[in-house]
Image (cartoon, helix red, strand yellow):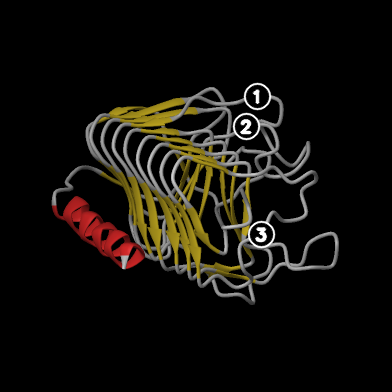
Amino acid sequence: MKVRILLGAAVIAFGAGLAGLAGPVVAASADPVSAPLCPAAGLALAGTHHNLTVRGNAYVADGATLTVTGNLRLAPGSCLDAFSLGTVHVGHNVLVSHGATLALGCAPGANGPPPIAPCYFQTTNDTVGGSIIAYGPQTMYLTAVTVGHNVISIGGGPGTKAVGVSFPVKNMNIHGDLILAGWHGGWIGALRNHVDGNMVIAHNAGSRIGETGLPDSTEIDGNTVGHNLICVGNSPTARFGDAPPPHANIVGGVAVGECADLT
């Protein structure tokens, strides 16, 4: 019941965020990031905006700063690649629509060893004052971002046949809840995050096989959770994964479901 209440609140929050959003539209127009995550070249974003909507593909280059004092929205099917040495500050919420891809923040080990990861030896300082809310995203790459409220993702993904598509949430500092529910793709995991509220990992599916020859998703490792850790209905079930050594999750409340033995 608690899981259903949290997921229902997430959908309501996403709808409310979209209803109150207005601002300039950014149309697609090359991404110099060493490991581009968007499917095609896009528009470089920088400077200060009130509300900002991204359509098509866009990126934040190394050394650039993008500040959005209000809301940042990714339109359906769009892609924002801020997996770079750039800096992003959003005053209110980041809203990710159906089929969109968001890559935000970077830290050592975020997406493989060098030279794959552009910021393997450096941690960025991206911030979101409100929440990151996604409804039906293609995927998100979230790393080392400080979030004032919640990170919530409901549904989405390219399907489990897309083995190479991942949904990593790593090294985040989240002052509310982390909810990842209903995403289907190659791999999904939450590693080394600090979550002040609850962490809910529910009904996700991942098809990637790890280096040991065993299923690698759904990887829940090294998180510190202030309240409860709830993992239910995932395929494969939540596990430490193949990143040695496993690090137990520290939970201030209770760990239930598939994550009961991961503390």
Image coordinates of residue 146 in percent, x first then y, are 43, 31
Which callout, 2 or 3, points to the residue nearer the camera? 3
Mark 1 or mark 3: whose residue is earlier in sequence: 1
Find residue 194 and name its label: none
Q: Are marks 1 and 2 in contact (CB under 8 Å)?
A: yes
Element type where label 2 sits in the image? loop
What is the distance, in whole Å, between disc 1 and disc 2 at their CAs? 6 Å
Q: Nearer the viewer, residue 103 or 7?
A: 7
How packed is label 2: few (under 14 Cα within 10 Å), some, or many (20 or more)? many
Mark 2 or mark 3: whose residue is earlier in sequence: 2
Mark 1 or mark 2: whose residue is earlier in sequence: 2
What is the distance, in whole Å, between disc 2 and disc 3 at their CAs? 23 Å
Image coordinates of residue 259 in percent, x first then y, are 57, 58
Q: Residue at label 2?
A: 107
Up the image or down, 144 lies above or below 259; here it is above
Q: Residue at label 3?
A: 239
* Amino acid type assigned to the residue bearing label 2 in the image: Ala
Residue at image point 50% right, 37% down: 172
Image coordinates of residue 209 in percent, x first then y, are 76, 67
Q: The N terminus is located in which quarter?
A: bottom left
Residue 39 lies in quadrant: bottom right
